[in-house]
Amino acid sequence: MERQIYYHDTDAGGVVYYGNYLKFLEEARTEFLEKKGLDIKVLRERKFLYAVRKCNLTYKSPARYGDIIICTADLKKTTAAQLIFDQKIFNKDTGKLLVEAEVSLVCLTQDFKPTTLPDYLKL
């Protein structure tokens, strides 16, 4: 996923506010699933919810206003109830690695109880 950094993405120091990287990672995971034919709206209609259970980020270098970033999402592993992603954010112009992340999503019922991943999610 490619994204431009806007003024509202930055903090008082002119760099991307650290919490905004979580939104960028979320957008990349959503696009990953959509490219696999898994629309979030359809998943919800099938009575399954997905929530971030664990998120481990390492910030390597800041993005700044006007930068174009590339956010990746690769499915590392699935367990009975989780999708585990390796994700990275790069500066498009320099290729510099900005953020590394491992993000675990858990499959939940409508009552927010963990449940087994449905077969169509075992990618």
Image (spheres, rainbow, N blue to C red):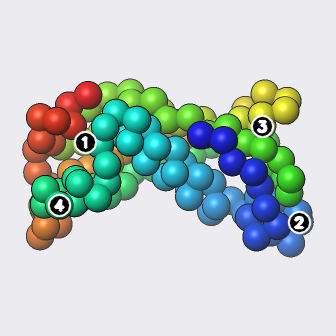
Residue at the image point whose x is 31% and y is 49% from the top: 39
Instruction: Say if 94 sits above or below 4 in the image.
Output: above
> Within the image, what quadrant is residue 121 found in?
top left
Is residue 14 toward the left or the right of residue 21 in the image? right
Q: CA distance from mark 3 to mark 1?
A: 29 Å
- Tell me the number on the disc at residue 82: 1
Regarding residue 84, the answer to whether it shows in the image is: no
Q: Which residue position is annotated with label 3?
A: 91
Q: CA distance from mark 2 to mark 3?
A: 18 Å
Q: Are marks 3 and 4 in contact (CB under 8 Å)?
A: no
Q: Nearer the viewer, mark 3 or mark 4?
A: 4
Tell me the SS state at disc 1: strand
Q: Closer to the N terminus: mark 3 or mark 1?
A: 1
Circle 3 Cα neighbour tier, 10 Å, few/some/many (<14 / 14–19 / ≥20) = many
Check disc 2 and give the amino acid type.
Gly
Check disc 1 and give the amino acid type.
Gln
Tell me the SS state at disc 2: loop
Instruction: Say if 32 sits above or below 55 in the image.
Output: above
Check disc 3 and give the amino acid type.
Asn
Is residue 80 toward the left or the right of residue 69 in the image? left
Q: Closer to the N terminus: mark 4 or mark 1?
A: 4
